[in-house]
Amino acid sequence: MVSQTPLRAAEFKSAYGPKYAFQPNFKGISVQSAARYGFRSATIGAGLGMALVLFASSLPRFRADVLSKIPIIGSTWEKKEIHPADNSPSTDMASPTGGAPDALASFKFASWAAGAVPVAFVLHTLLFKTSANSSGSLGLGFTVFLAAAAFLWLGVVSEIVPEPYLDEVFHIPQAQRYCEGKFLEWDDKITTPPGLYWISILIPQAAKSSGLISSYACGPKSLRATNAVGIIVLSYIALLCRKAIEARLHQAHSSISISSTSQYATHTAFNIALFPLLFFFSGLYYTDVISTAVVLVSFLNHLHRIGRDRSSFLSDVITIVLGLCSLTMRQTNVFWVVVFMGGLEAVHAVKSLQPEAVVQPYMTSLSEQLLFFFKRWSVGHVHDLPLNMAYPEGKKTPKSSSSKPNPNQGIPDMLFTAVSLIVAALCNPLRLIRQIWPYITVLAAFAGFVAWNGGVVLGDKSNHVATIHLPQMLYLWAFFGFFSLPLFVPYAILVVDAVRSVLIARKDKDIPKESKNVARKPALSLPLKLFTFIFNNRLLWPLYLAATFVLSGLVVRFNTIIHPFTLADNRHYMFYVFRYTIRRAPWIRYFLVLPYTISRWLVWGTLSGCTNWISGTHKDACSAYYHSSRPSSFTCDPFVAADVDASTSRNFQEEVKKDTKQDPLFISTEPVPTSTGLIFLLATTLSLITAPLVEPRYFIIPWVVWRLLVPAWRLHDHQEGESSLFDGASSTSLWGKFVNFCRGYDVRLILETIWFVLINLITGYIFLSKPYVWKAEDGSILDGGRLQRFMW
């Protein structure tokens, strides 16, 4: 057999000469391969070269003596002193006002909302022009509502708060300098890159050049309109992302391609746009809306890339460009582009190896067991179950006839997933680098920027020093728990069913035991018995919960950091959260470990989809494609043997074709793989634990990504069982009609919409109608008597 070389695979060689056609080459390197690898090396070299230049430009002597003397571009490195007056807002801005709008202002607000309707119809045509299902009419209503609400909110804020407020005092004057062409002037108080300013200038200028608008005034209202349009675009991108996620998950077990847009994807995208922190800042000139939208564009590109076994060179270049664009919005986006998306593509590269299936032999020693699975992992047969099988309720213990799941199985599954992926990556470096080299280039460019800048943030570095702040990962679960409260409805139903099963007397039914003649097998070695006992012991899950509970208490005790900005600015809600919880009494911060733990459990359970394990039973009514009796193809667990009958698999494929046509939620209920959950957790951790300041806006992208990954849910998962709350509902009664509706529509989405609208109304009302003036202890007015307002 002809061996494989790093530059040409074995299948393109032959012992008797070229397999297809002769290609002139020098020691196996042809003109095409040299050009291909030359392009890739040049691209990586460009990123590394830029990093080297940025690092060198951080040296004052090199910048003054070498770079500044380069013709034409040398003036770029000449540092100019900026007069302090340039940091103050312009004098032509209106003075602060407060109170409710008058009748004329109300007419203006209505005009803003009405003017958004044509925009909504255009966007709806773009979104649903290829959709032939009922999600088209649903999307039309959502698009019109979102556009009207966004421009109405923009009009109200611009009328009542016409002057720049809070961080806008820095962002708006800087954007106005860009409007004047002063691209080298920079306010040292601004910490984020200028990506928002570029978009605010380039898009209006392009529209002006094409004749869509006659003029563009670079004022507060016009700049804020960037985010109002951005929130609508973000909703569209979120829709495409969720649609692509459903297509990739469905593609894993079916050859049927998905072209239609599901109702779940449409409503999910709408709710993401209504997310209170995103919608609130769509009326102000902040970076969060546009930054999130650009990250989602990169995520959408990544989802298209993993839909193919190999990516093209053009796709790699686009990935680099989108990654760099994400970094121009916010520096922490590097974790989502490089760690999250790059990590997912590394998993895709490993899985695309597609090794030949082998029959697992019966092994009696631990060394044989580990050696066999390490070999399987090294060729790409990794252990990566869907989260509904890896989470505690996932699968039954091997050789068990009980219908109850093993509650600790999710812990070994996550461990084996991580280990198997690491082994596969180390054994296939060339395939891995070929897939993720665009993300390595982005990381190299970011490292060069940090070296040139002397830190991550651009300005105000003394107040933004990177610090290990582990409690951020505790606050994150409480944040998710509050805003995603409607998504936890399945747990409430399971608790009610569990209580009903205890209160309602039932006759125990004798379950006939299956009599099987099982051939005796050789005894297992003592180490293998010990490991099997540990990983299949039901005590492991309670021990895990206790360990995480104690670890959370230690983190609270030794790593709680309260940033001076949190205590100094009472205009943010976080000031009052800390004031009435963590700083209220020492014991409260330890008591909060309990809600942190419960919130984390609910968030991960929601991400896993099926949650039947809390009721003590585990039936195959789970909506996900893979469950206890239908194992995943990426099951490679040293201590659980899974076998799938080929004829059964063919029958399931027929079920897929039938259910896809009849069930509107069928393609939306599949949870993501365990590797996706672990990489999401890693990216979230890295993006948060280095920030000493607790800022709700830091949690926006983690929540958006998590929300996109959450699968659909329906009452079908709770329809079986004698104690079910939904048993015996008449189809003609109002309750029965509601139950039938919930079988085909995720009712949590409706509750989530109501919840977000309610929060937006309350926070918007407080921001506009409850201004106040800062006063000193002696009663004197501070900050020139400017009106202060409550906000996120």
Image (tube, rainbow, N blue to C red):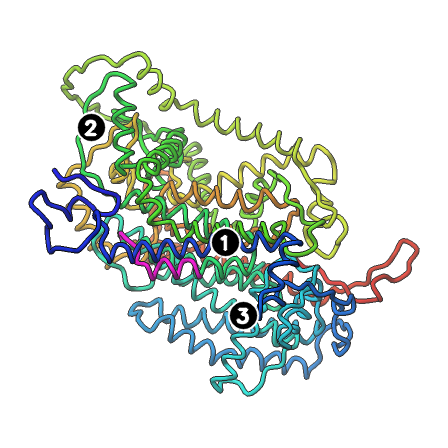
Q: Is residue 428 among the parts visible in the rendering? A: yes
| Picture coordinates of residue 556, whole percent (x, y) | 64, 34
The C terminus, quarter of image: bottom right
Residue 398 is labelled as none
Q: Quadrant of the N terminus?
A: top left
What label sits on residue 199 in the rendered view?
A: 3
Boundaries of the magenta span: 309-321
Tell which circle, 2 or 3, labels the residue nearer the N-terminal end: 3
* Amino acid type at image mark 2: Gln
Residue 328 lies in the magenta-colored region: no
Residue at the image point whose x is 48% and y is 41% from the top? 682
Q: Nearer the N terminus, badge 2 or badge 1?
A: 2
Q: Earlier in the sequence, mark 3 or mark 1?
A: 3
Residue 290, how many percent across, how many down?
53, 64
Q: Which residue is mark 1?
A: 445
Residue at image position (34%, 60%) is: 315
Q: Main secondary structure of the magenta part?
A: helix
Q: Secondary structure at mark 2?
A: loop
Viewer-side residue, 320 vs 479 = 320
**Kind of residue at badge 1:** Ala
Tell me the amino acid under the disc marked 3: Ile
> Where is mark 2, residue-wise?
360
